[in-house]
Amino acid sequence: MALTLRTLAAEPALALRVVAGEAGLDRPIGWVHPTELTDPQSFLEGGELLLTTGLTLYSATYAAYVRRLVDADVAGLGFGVGLSHAKVPDALVAVADEVGLPVLEVPRKTPFIAITRAVSRSVAADEYAATVRIGRAQQELTRTAVGRGGAGGVVRRLARLIDGWVVLYDSAGRVREASSAKARSAELDVTGLRAGTRVVSHGDDEVVLQTLHTRGALAVGTAEPLDSTGQHIVNTAVSLLSLALEQDRAQRVSLSQLHTGVLELLAAGHHELAHEVVPDLPPEPWTVLAVAGSKAARNTLYERLETLAGQVFAAHRGDKLIVLAENDAVREIVAETGEFHSGLSTGEFPVALRQAEEAAEAARTQRVPMLRYADHAGAGLLGLVDHQAAQAFSDQLLAPVREFDRAGRGDLELSLRCWLEHHGHWDLAATKLGVHRHTLRNRVTKAAELLGRDLDAPGVRAELWFALQVRS
């Protein structure tokens, strides 16, 4: 702890007496500088205890002299008496009290060198203590980093060393590790943080935001500003965390490549070998999801899905992320992001994989978030027919039904579509529409009458389904 004016004045051997500025006695002393200059500002850095006998001072210069010392940010003034002045001049004391500058009266029997030695010993002791503290902190942080604690252990250890709280963010600005619940709830925005350090306030705490050497950022919150020792300790943690995250990144890359290899084994039908490599594959049968999107977005989704090992398996394949799950729950994860085009399929894996990838491409072409292969395949014939020709066919075939609906006499087209979607099942289609099955039967009968077609004929149903899929 730095030596303060109060502590120095309390040393009996020095016999110092406080005569002004008592409220500022807790200022730390950076060094001691004896001088008889009336304007020593250019020789000061701030924080010094200035020693003088007042040899060149007289009543007309006291006020300006004291204010120059305040401007130079000195810690205090030691005024030696018994030489040019029998006591500290009252006028100087009055000005010092007015501006809050501590003044210590130094008796004739106390040489200035004694004060210098006392401060020097304290500074040396502080520097030694700081060196020891930094060394011990570096050892503790290093042991934690290379041990089982990992990045989370380093974060928690750092928080204890600086008596504060710490949050580690990944490159996307998400919390990766936090030293406490308070740290996790800090909700600091580090996404716009560039290389270097920024100091912000969070409640009553001062927070140092510092970028890591590789990726991510570190937030360090303390009730008081970090001293130089604390800054050294934080810098050590930054280096260790940067290395740890880089190692994690390399491991994730290797694991991603392994997953891609396992996916290819599954696609080739080598299920037993794939299970030997990754024993915690989700239980079969699988829902297969192919996700198309930017590389960054796919990587972000992959990292999120890594936390669901055993429930979800994800692997990169070309320009898509392939996800295997026991059910359709993974769709909710994709739907939250809103930045993907995905295809979904089920069944035997090699076939389902191909179908999901094909549906993902179709979803990207049609600019829809999600497309089931079954729906895509159902409309597959449309891709083989010229759109204008298909539109003309649809308009001609459905014209009587649409004219009837436009006259406000029913919902024949909607009812016909729903009935066909449910393969002619009256009860299911009626429930879907929210009408009685007799109402639905009357509507379908009316549609058949207007169309002049036998709706029990499979070919007629196929033509109607094709016409209903055409979009204007």
Image (cartoon, grey):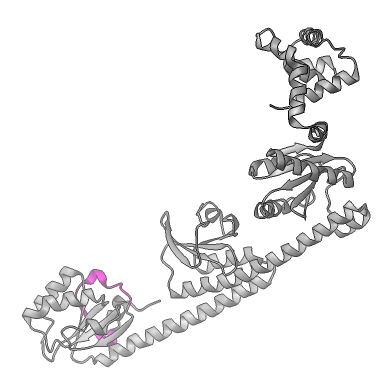
Vertical relation: 305 (above or below) 20: above
Horizontal and vertical percent position of residue 380: 82, 34
Q: Nearer the viewer, residue 150 or 396?
A: 396
Q: Quadrant of residue 327?
A: top right
Q: Is residue 33 left or right of residue 310?
A: left
In the depicted structure, whether residue 56 falls above or below residue 3: below
Horizontal relation, residue 30 to residue 426: left or right: left
Would residue 445 be found to the left or right of residue 90 on screen?
right
Q: Position of residue 64 (x, y in %)?
A: 13, 76
Query: Magenta residues?
Result: 12-28
Instruction: Say whether residue 102 is visible.
Output: no
* Residue at 51% in and 52% down: 187
In the displayed image of the protein, which residue is found farthest to the left? 60
User: Quadrant location of residue 204?
Assistant: bottom left
From the viewer's perspective, tell me whether residue 143 is left or right of residue 53: right
Relative to 207, is 468 above or below?
above
- The answer to which quarter of the image holds residue 79 is bottom left
Q: Residue at x 29, y 81 (%)?
A: 48
Up-down relation of residue 36 to residue 426 (above or below): below
The quadrant of the picture occupied by the C terminus is top right
> In the rendered structure, does residue 148 fall within the stretch colored magenta?
no
Residue 15 is inside the magenta segment:
yes
Q: Position of residue 271 (x, y in %)?
A: 92, 53
Q: Is residue 314 visible?
A: yes
Q: Who's the residue at 80% across and 25% down the image? A: 466
